[in-house]
Every structure is written in structure tokens, then in C-alpha cells.
Image (tube, rainbow, N blue to C red):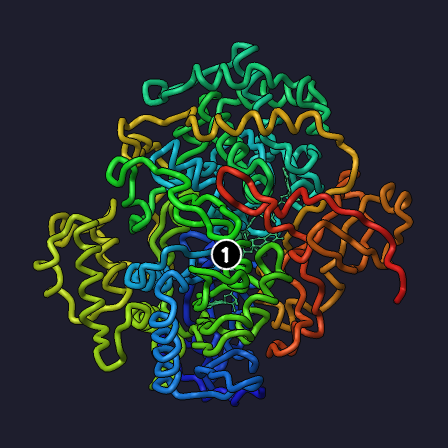
Amino acid sequence: MEATVAAPTRVVGRQLRVEPDGTRVHLRQCPLCECMCGMEIHLDPDDRVKVIRPDRDDVWSKGYICPKGTTIGKLHEDPDRIRRPMIREGETWREATWEEAFARCEELLHGVRQRHGIEAMTAFIGNPAGHSFSIGRYGALLMGQAGFPMIYSAGTVDQWPKNVSCVLMYGNMWKIPTVDIRRTDYWVIMGGNPQASGGSLLSCPDVLGEIDAIRARGGTVVVVDPRRTGTADRASEWLPIRPGTDAAFLLALCHVVFADGLLDLGRIAHLVDGVEDVRAAVAEFSPEAVEAFCQVPAETIRRIAHDLAGAERGALYGRIGLCNQEFGTLASWLVDVVNVLTGHFDVEGGMMFGKPVAEPLTWKTDTRVMGEPEFGRWRSRVRGAPEVLGQVPCSCLAEEIATPGEGQLKALITIAGNPVISAPDSAQLEEALPLLECMISIDNYLNETTRFAHVILPGPSPLESPHFDELMWGWAVGSAAKWSDQLFATDPDYVPEWEILARLGWYCTGGTTEAFDFAALDDGWFSVLCQMYGRDPAETLPLYDHGGPERMIDLQVRMGPWGDRYGGVPDGLTLQKIKEAPHGIDLGPMVPRLEEVIGTPNGHIQLAPPYILGDLPRLRAALDRDPDGYVLVSRRHLRSKNSWMHNVKVLVKGKDRCTLLVHPDDAAQLGLVDGGRARVSSEAGSIEVPVEVSDEMMRGVVSLPHGWGHDRPGTRLSVAREHAGVNSNLLAPGHFVDELSGNAAVNGIPVEVAPAVPA
Ligand SMILES: Nc1nc2c(c(=O)[nH]1)N[C@H]1C(S)=C(S)[C@@H](COP(=O)(O)OP(=O)(O)OC[C@H]3O[C@@H](n4cnc5c(=O)[nH]c(N)nc54)[C@H](O)[C@@H]3O)O[C@H]1N2
Ligand SMILES: Nc1nc2c(c(=O)[nH]1)N[C@H]1C(S)=C(S)[C@@H](COP(=O)(O)OP(=O)(O)OC[C@H]3O[C@@H](n4cnc5c(=O)[nH]c(N)nc54)[C@H](O)[C@@H]3O)O[C@H]1N2
Ligand code: SF4
Ligand SMILES: [Mo]
């Protein structure tokens, strides 16, 4: 269907200055990735975005910005973007009033609840939720009210292995340490490509600039990756590794640390339990025992171990290449173990915990308070996948919808997610979603997933909502406080995303529109938060004349490490003070703070969790595998963000980016030519894709980006459709997971590659 012409936008956000030609300049932070760049939005007299420039005075990003950030105005103005609720009528859509749309949601959710019970209802939460305070807080309210037995998220195609290792080691799944790269002199990067991603579980503007700085001060940066990435090009050394074998490489590093007397726990020695268990566990994983498996020479592994241990300020970091793989939890755990064993943990230039100005809600759930995690408390109905940290692999969603029987899913709410593209076994999900009796999507686009919904409720554009990052500061390389006003007004009848979420949760309980009282629910949720942050709700509620996310942010800031504690610390921070600092407030570099942060019952790091050690036999068995055959890995590009920014013309123009990267010798052997087409097949499916021959790949490994495949019928993505690409997750088998976390192994997928035979 055609989009209605957007109503003229009206500026409500504050302006920093007015230029001589009348251009008004608004400041805000980019919400797209973990870099959290400050930008200047230049506005025409007719309230349109004229240009977006970096904010050189931003205390955090200091003038750094990337091409994606400069297109936020294009996202806002995109004629394809959904601005009003949409209701499906058979095969067509019509725009509806909010009232009508909510009435339809109520009817659909109540129907499923009455016919099938809450067991038949669930939600899927996607990536932008991590960058949105409003979704973070009110998505939790939705879930809390509804009490779904099981939910699904992009987390199980992302960082779930790290969540598992952190909850076991530090007592909290979201207390994820990162590397103090601004002060390190030796940095090993594994399975991450900040050149494209901006950095992940590592918030820092301009990571490449930091790499240059490390080298300029005489330091060393080593990239361990099957692909010679843009990051590797800037580093001192590229070390190719066979996908999925990082855990073995890291075990060998630990082996050398013990065998060669390099063990040094440093300052935190008295806070580490389990060192001897690790020593015993790594004994059999010598560099010689793993070199064939990893395809990294034993002497190289020894050298890296010695260099890292010998560095005064050094650290090893691992990201999505280490999570989205078969031994994800082992690898994610070992990254931290290596840093602890070499004295690079909780020290400057090593691996440290962030210090957020507003302590995240997720940091309030230490095992010391909540009890030790139990895994496998229940199993998924169809596959029998064990629950891990409340979720099962997101690839289970399709079969739970498609398989009849008690507990079959009938209602799904998607929140800022596009699982038809992002989740493994996408073909199955595409077939399953039409079977739902109720699907409601909160999203900005009619895309590959939301086209199956019965109702779509529009989220705000990045310029229609205020912005405050919470989660990202937990792994930022420094501390700062930044706030962005909502820039453009929404339609008068627009319902903010937080209220949408609260409402849907309410309907899931059987609540009616008539009885819905947002203020009461919001006060109730705020009162719970008050208690979690150590404030008496009865004293705190009367201090505010407004609800919503801002009140919660103020609470978290005021009760945070720099907060005014509601008057207890007169010079302390409040949200108001942060708002008054348009370029942000710099709160300094990382600081050692293990004692403050650790959430385990005895206050010690648990270096050798039995749950994780229990997976070593599986890895040991894999060492003898036949190393032949091709495997597929994923990649990202700077001008793309997962699946949803391909409708921005300036970002997708130019050369096709959805290509299969193949090493020249492999291409020759396979009969592939640059610019030709290949057929790639796995046990899950088969696709055709253009070939790009490049020596940036190691032999035996091919690479495809994820997030493409915009050729599906029934979407409203006119630009993306012209640059459709193929969906790499058609090749990802749903059952191929890291067993300990249930996280998808979308890297290291065995594939067959051949020239495409013209039809
Ligand atoms: N093969 C392979 N697959 C992968 C990965 C990989 O590396 N390889 N990476 C995985 C990772 S790390 C992730 S995080 C997932 C991402 O998985 P998803 O989160 O499912 O996918 P996205 O493409 O990020 O989709 C985000 C959706 O949110 C919508 N949106 C954007 N902003 C807002 C907002 O403010 N409000 C609302 N309501 N909606 C909004 C967009 O229109 C889009 O539909 O993909 C995973 N899939
Ligand atoms: N421009 C852009 N930025 C993004 C995103 C985006 O889509 N586009 N997505 C955002 C999201 S949701 C996330 S989670 C982050 C992810 O951020 P990163 O973790 O930096 O992700 P990638 O850029 O995909 O880099 C992953 C690297 O791992 C390598 N790799 C694959 N398999 C293996 C393996 O088995 N072992 C090793 N050692 N390496 C392997 C790949 O070759 C690739 O170079 O990026 C975020 N930032
Ligand atoms: S690096 Fe780009 S996408 Fe990431 S926050 Fe900065 S401008 Fe936005
Ligand atoms: Mo992600």
C-alpha cells in the first residue's frame, strides 16, 4: 500500500544556536550503534533536516561520526516509514486510528488468551531495544505483566554466550567487562571488526583512531579473524584462524601461561576462585594439540601468550565471531580467563568494568540477591531445547508456531525486531508466521517480518523520541552523561512507544481498554524501581509531576555513582543538570572497581564455573575433526545496520555489498570468478549470490553479510527492494547452536560452494 504523505514536522527540541542564514542547530546523540556519537542537526527554515555534522565539542565523541549517523534525517523523512497504525484486512492494509488499532490488538490478544491461555503467547525483542531506554524499561513492563512462559530475542543470535559466562563469573549476566583501549599497549581483537561495527560490548567512538594511537605509542594490535578485515588492515598483525576454533586457541594460551610460568593475577589475586581448576582443565590443550584444529601455528600461539602476559598494559577482547559460533560460551569465558591469568583484569589498560552514570536496571540482578542461575529449568516444547537465562534459541520460534499440540504458539508480539531476516532457519519462520492467530508488531517499517502482522504500531523515528543510553555505558571505555531531546513533534494523537508497550502487556493479562490506566501502571512500575534503587517510593513519587521514562532516568542518575541522592549529595547529578550540558558531561576514564561491581555471593570472580568446564569434552572431541570443507562466516559493513537501514538510498548506493567473499585459490579450485555467481548450500538451504574474489579471506572460509534479502512480497521498502541481496540466514541451521547458551552458530556453518548454473 502507499504511504500517506507525512504531516509536516514541527521542531520541539532545544536549539544550540541559530546561524546567520537562519539555520537552527540542534544537538543530539546518534542512537544507532555503541559509539554514541554527538551530532549537530542543522535545520532548514521549513523544519527539515538540512545536514548532519559531527559535534566537535561533544565530550565523548569529540567530532567523530560515521556515514550512518548522517542519514538519521533520511530515516525520519523516509516516505516508506510507518507513521500511523496499520491494520491488516485479508491481503491488504489500511491505516487506522490509534483507537481502532488498540481495539483490534485487544480483541486479538483477548481471543488467543481465552482460547489457548498465556502458554500460547509470546514476544520477540530485537536489537534497537538495546539502544532505547523506553523499550528497555517498558518492554520489561510488558513482559512482567503478561507473564509469558517463554520469550525470544535477538540476544540468542548475539551475546548470550557472554551473558552466560558473566553471570557465572561475576554474578550478573549484564556485567560485561571490556577493554580500556585508550590506555593499553597490547591489544588482541578476536571475532570483532570495529572498522565496520564501531565496536561492540566495547563502547568507544573511533576505535580505529584508538588502534592508530596504540601503535603510535609503540604498542601492538593483533587481530585474530578468518578474514583480514578493515580493522586488521590498521593493526600490527593479522592472525587468520579457522572459524569456531577460538576456544581451543584460548585454552592453548592459558596452557602456555601455566606451563611457562607466566601466571600473574596481580592486584585482584585474593578475589579470584578456581585458578587451580583452570590449570587442570587446560593441561591437555597445548599449542601443539590445537594448532591443526585452529590452523594457527603452535609457535604463534606461544608468542602471543608471552607477548600478552609480558605487556605491562595489555588485554584480549572477543566479540561476535566468538559468540555466534559452536563453542561460543567456552570462547567468551576464556577471553576473560586469559585476562585474569595474565594480570590484565581490573587494571588500567586491561579489561575493566564500565561505570555508567545511571546504573543499569540489569545491574540490579546480582546472583548474590537473586540466587545462582539454574539452566534448563524448562525445555522448549518441540525441540526440547533447555532454557538458558530465560530464553531458548530464537530459531525455536518457528517450530513452536508451526507444530500443533498443547502449548502451540498462537500470538506473537514483535518489538523492534526482524527475525525473518536475522534469525537462523529463516525459511521456516517465514512459513510459520502466517499461521498465527494474532501477530502485533511495533516497528517503523512494513518489512519481511511485520508484513505477517495483523496490526503494526509505529515506533518513533530517531528524531521523534528523546534519547538516553543506559546499557552501552556498562561497557564504555570511559564515563559520560548525555541526553538528547525529542527533536520533532509527533502527531497530536501519537501514542508514545512506552505507552504502547504498557498497553499490550495489559491486554495480555485480559485487561480492557476501558480499564487501562497508564498513570497507575507507570507509578506502580516506578515504585518497584525506586525500591530497587534504594529509594522509598512514597517519598519519591510526590517529587515528580510527570511519569514515563524520564522520571526513571532521573531516579537512576540521582541514585547513581555521581547522583545527588535526592539532596543527600548537594553537588550531585540530576537529569536536569545533564540536560543543561548540551555537549554532555565528561566523567572520566575507566577505573578499577571489581569490588564494587562483583555480584557473586562470596564477592570473588568464579574463574572455573563447572557448567562451563562441562563443555570441554565436546571441544576435545572436535579437535580430531577433518579440517577440510568450506565454512561460512558473517560480516558487517559500515554503511549498514543489521537488516533495517537498507531503505536509505545514500547508504545502499554504489557497488553491491551482499557478496560472497572467496579466497583466490579457493575460487580457482571451485571454478568461481569475480563478479560471477555462486550457489552456496548448507543443510538448511541453498542460495545464489554474486562472488567477490579477495585474498582478505583465509582459505576454506567464505563470508556473507547478514541482514539482506529484501525481495519478499508484501513489504514497503522501495529502496531496499532495489538492492535486495540474499538472506544469509537461509543457510543457518536452527539446531546449530552453542550448546551451553543456545546461541546460534551463524559462523562456521559447513557449506558447499559451486558456480551457479544458469536457470
Ligand atoms: N547470519 C547472521 N545473523 C545475524 C547476525 C550475524 O552476525 N550473522 N547478527 C545478529 C545480531 S548481533 C543481531 S543484534 C540481530 C538483529 O536482529 P533484529 O533485531 O531482529 O534485526 P534488526 O535488523 O536489527 O531489526 C530491527 C527492527 O527494529 C525496527 N526499529 C528500528 N528502530 C526502532 C524503534 O525505535 N522502535 C521500534 N519499535 N522499532 C524500531 C526496524 O525497522 C527493524 O524492523 O541479528 C542477528 N543475526
Ligand atoms: N555498521 C554496522 N555496525 C553495527 C552493526 C551492523 O549491522 N552494521 N550491528 C551492530 C550489532 S547488532 C552488533 S552485535 C555489533 C557486532 O560487532 P562486531 O562483533 O565487531 O561484528 P562484525 O563486524 O560482524 O565482526 C565480526 C568478525 O568476526 C569474524 N568471525 C566470524 N567467525 C569467527 C570465528 O569463528 N572466530 C573469529 N576469531 N572470528 C570470526 C568475522 O570475520 C568478522 O570480521 O555490531 C553493531 N554495529
Ligand atoms: S559510529 Fe555512526 S552509527 Fe555509530 S553512533 Fe556514531 S554516527 Fe551513529
Ligand atoms: Mo547485535
Quarter occupied by the C terminus: bottom right
Which residue corresponds to the image point at 36% horizontal and 55% vertical from the top-left? 149
The kind of residue tagged 1 is Cys
- For label 1, the SS is loop
202 to the left or right of 466: right
Which residue lies at the image location 42% right of the left edge and 37% below the top edge? 177
Does the beta carbon of the residue at mark 1 sit less than 8 Å from ligand 3?
yes
Residue on which disc 1 sits: 33
Q: Nearer the viewer, residue 88 or 209?
A: 88
**Camera-side residue of 663 and 746:** 746
Query: Percent from the top left, x then y, of residue 476?
Result: 42, 45
Quarter of the image for the N terminus: give it. bottom right
On screen, residue 473 versus residue 258, left or right, reads: left
Say which residue appears at 50% left-offset and 14% top-offset: 280
- Determine which quarter of the picture holds residue 13: bottom left
Place residue 621 in its image quadrant.
Answer: top right
Observer able to see residue 166: yes
